[in-house]
Amino acid sequence: MNFFVADPGWGWWIISYFFLGGIAAGCYFMAAIIDLFGRPEDRPLARIGYALALPLIVICGVLLTLDLHRPERFWHMLFKSEVVKEASAQGWPTTGAGWSTMASAPVFKFWSPMSVGSWALTLFGLCSALSLLGSLWPGGRLERWFRRSWFGMGITVLGCCVGFFVAAYTGALLTATNQPIWSDSVWIAPLFLTSAASTGIATILLIGRWRNVGADPLQRLGQADRWALVLELAFFLAFVGSLGALLSVVVSVPIGMVFVGGTLLIGIVVPLVLQIRAAGSGRHGIVTAALLVLIGGFLLRYGILMTIPALLEHRSAIASRFGPEDGRARGGGPGADPGNQAGKIEPPSKIRGTR
Amino acid sequence: MPVQTEGAAMAENVGFFTDTSVCIGCKACQVACHQWNNLPSPDGQRRPLPVLSGNSYDNTGSLSDTNWRHVKFIEQFSGDANRSQARWLMMSDVCKHCVNAPCLEVCPTGALLRTEFDTVFINEPACNGCRDCISACPFGVIHMSDLPGKNVAQKCTFCYDRLQQGMTPACAQACPTQSIRFGPMPQLQQVARQRVADLHRQGESGAYLYGADDKILGGLNAFYLLLDKPEVYGLPSAPKLPSRSVLRSSFWAIVSAFLVGLAALFTFRERTRRAPEGGIAPGASPSPEERA
């Protein structure tokens, strides 16, 4: 654990991105599975998934751009600005020399989650757009091209894989830092992925219910959600377990309590119980469970991002207690000098003529 | 990729050796750094005027976007009731210009560069302010500038402009006690080892070097002679390279993706088997429900 770091200041834009990006990836993944393997009566759910994935991922792009301190330089994530500048000076796009220089402009660092994630988001946006196009007019030419042909199925499979990546890379990005907690666990990426699945399925479930999709497809979706929640529970416990003694540090700040308790209870355990009960007794409780899954998914992202700045604020009390004065509260007892009672000492004073 | 001045060969690997045992906390290094790099001073409006921080004689608090050098004042007292023993540890903190630099590794835009002197430099026009470097730096060195029109990551440049002219960095030039020494790394390492041996001979047995060898992030081009454990100076004992976690993290992400996919597949696939009319073949027409 390293408490000597600075806070990157990833706040609401990034929390919202993590949350909505997870839902987008979960929606696309579920839509793809239904599209490829589901029954015809399940397909309206796939259309809902595609219809959600694209707008959400576009919003995510906007959120990420807004979070940059230099938003107008968002394209630097994909292309080296210096090389683009040089290519422009050589007359790109109208000259061969410009194109030749431009060929070396893309920046792709496979070891840096943020670099790979930028490309993955671009690719996921493209797949989402094509799949959405394919689902807009059932029976039309676009559906044959982008969903039913081998090319379309290829797009679906690729989008599903990239969607999984988009869901998980944000967790790997947090782990690939030196921040306390984030860098102390390798379980954030799988946790984010399973949470993306559960929140994506929950969103499709809610919209499907609203759009009066049949009971059977929703029941199957509920079953998929139960599986996702069970896996999320397993990975959440693995994450908490991997923190070891650090868990007490996390829950020492209120946000940490909300993060651990909120995610576990509101986001996983209660909806799982509601889902299991609903499976035995009709549809009652499914909507509540789906809403709770979404709240829990948000708390997971909010908690994991905001707990660290809260811990860093108290870094002296947590990480470097070299003396009992450190962390002493106002009126909190004698502190470092229990034997040195002020009352026993007479300070020099003009009143007594000792000064 | 090192930044190469035109026609220049790979220059000598230079570094800072900061001997904290002779630092007197005069802050000449901070002032010289401010002056040379035109770092703005507090103006009482956008930037509050310095006040005593309540933490010894430190009024700048930490490294920041405008403090690329920062002198730490650490007061230590013995645990007895009368605090009969006391000492001040002073240390001029700066970017460590790590040999394996976490900031440079994660930077998605390529704004962080390795120079021909083996130092780490932020190419400001390329930085878009994503702050990944801040999260990756184990020493809390990098900060965002909030100056109008700037808004990019900031840290010590190792006076890259001065190095290119064969000059000593401003802080080392200004240091009156030679606490900050500048020079070629092999030479500095030799001087530092000799200094540790001298201090041991004089009875200061706690003196040791931090970052002089390759154990911490492959070595630190700004390394230290310390008199207490690293944490006392606000330095981590075992900082890590971010990429070392990526593979393990990715492996478990793939496992989780496989399990989630399998679970969803199982849920819908099972129904497909039970229902003979199910399944979608390429080129199949949409269902009546979907047409609706």
Image: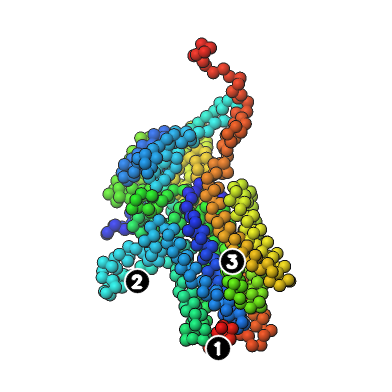
Q: Which mark is residue A291?
A: none
Most extreme residue toward the right is A280
Label 1 with label 3: CB-CB less than 8 Å: no
Chain identifier of the residue bearing label 2 in the image: A
Image position, residue A227 (x, y; %): 66, 69
The residue indicated by pointer 1 is B284
- Farthest residue in the top direction? A353
Q: CA distance from mark 1 to mark 2?
A: 41 Å
Circle 2 sits on which residue? A103
Q: CA distance from mark 1 to mark 3?
A: 30 Å
Q: Earlier in the sequence, mark 3 or mark 2?
A: 2
In the depicted structure, whether residue A30 falls above or below residue B197:
below
Badge 3: chain ID: A
Q: Left of A96 or right of it: where is B69?
A: right
Residue type at mark 2?
A: Ala
Circle 3 sits on which residue? Answer: A199
Residue A8 visible in this rendered orientation of the protein: yes
- Identified at 27% across, 59% down, the residue is B6
Label 1: state its secondary structure.
Answer: loop
Amino acid on which the number 3 mark rests in the picture: Thr
Same subunit: marks 1 and 2: no
Q: Residue at x 59, y 66 (%)?
A: A199
Residue B185, how many percent across, how many down? 39, 48
Q: Quadrant of residue A43?
A: bottom right
Q: Is residue B37 left or right of B227 when viewed as pictured?
A: left
